[in-house]
Amino acid sequence: MFGLASAWIQFAVCLVLIGWGGVKLSHYGDVIAEKTGMGGTWIGLILMATVTSLPELVTGVSAVGFANTPDIAVGDVLGSCVFNLLIIVVLDFLYRKESVYTRASQGHVLSAGFGVLLIGFAGFNMLLSANGNMPSFWHVGVYTPIIILIYAVAMRTVFRYEREHMSAAVEGAAERYPGLTLKQASLRYAGAAGMVVAAALWLPFVGKTIATLMEWHESFVGTLFVAFATSVPELAVTIGALRIGAIDMAIGNVLGSNLFDILILAIDDILYLPGPLLSHTSQSHAVTALSAMMMTGVAIIGLLYRPKARVFKTVGWASLFLFSLYLLNTYVIYLYAN
């Protein structure tokens, strides 16, 4: 059994490795997208959102396949959805020219709407699974193939919308990385991926140790700490996009990551052999799902209403609501799970 200090040090190491490796993953993923002709297209943007969600995927696989901590797996997925939406608040605060909602394309409402649908469907099935009688195919919950289907429909719909209504998100990408070849980028991408995978595989074990030593429930640790650690790449990439003025890429990465995170929930369910995953986890995760839905709803309102005013010259009222909902979710999860 690790000591408490040792457990927190290991968590910090995992955080640093995932953060640094995640940034490199995103960078070289962008290079690969460019060199293969995908840079600046819908496929490139989806690739970025998928790449930054790699830590959640690996952590979930480790949690259900090796560490036997289903609450950490589910908490990581839904906690990441909530934290990703909090990133919009960071963007609004850092973008001093005007409110970020006035610059972002209203086309993001489509992916946000699918996010509400997927997250809501996951939360709905969490409540249905409370009595442990969730219908299943062998050990896989009946909700899993439906999540996969909804995700596929969402990707197809967003692709068709982008093709018909929006121009390429990034122009002139072919000249951004003249000093790197596709082979070099691929090798460095693989090295960064290995670092992220190693740290993410170990993270559930560290989270379980912290939960035990701190006498916290695994759902709280997964929702708050593990989710924060695995969301560091999204934060870094989104801020990086903001620095070059790519507001739509920043918002798209956040909302796209949330869609992929719910798909990860389905993947975790397939790999969790004792039975339907949601039948073996705490109902407190439904609180996080509802929080993510409300936060996405606030984001949709902000994108449509496009408020220009800032509260005390800091962030818009929509961002203030997002931050308040994040704090409320954290507080309720702590009370509910402990």
Image (cartoon, helix red, strand yellow):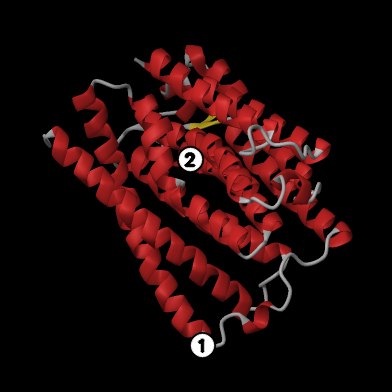
Side (left or right) of 142 relative to 201: right
| Residue 69 relative to residue 240: left or right | left
Q: Residue at x 74, y 36 (%)?
A: 309
Q: Residue 311 in the image: state x and y as whole percent.
A: 66, 32
Does residue 253 appear left or right of residue 29 in this picture?
Answer: right
- Residue at 66%, 82% (x, y): give it: 174
Closer to us: 306 or 286: 306
Which residue does the numbered mark 2 point to in the structure image? 270
Q: Which image quadrant: the C terminus?
A: top left
Q: Residue at x 59, y 44 (%)?
A: 93
Question: Is the residue 15 above or below the residue 150 in the image?
Answer: below
Answer with left or right where residue 141 lies relative to residue 321: left
Q: Is residue 72 visible?
A: yes
Per the rendering, the mark at residue 179 is: 1
In three-dimensional space, the C-alpha distance between marks 2 and 1, rounded to whole angstroms, equals: 42 Å
Q: Is residue 42 above or below residue 89?
A: below
Q: Is the C-beta separation of discs 2 and 1 under 8 Å?
A: no
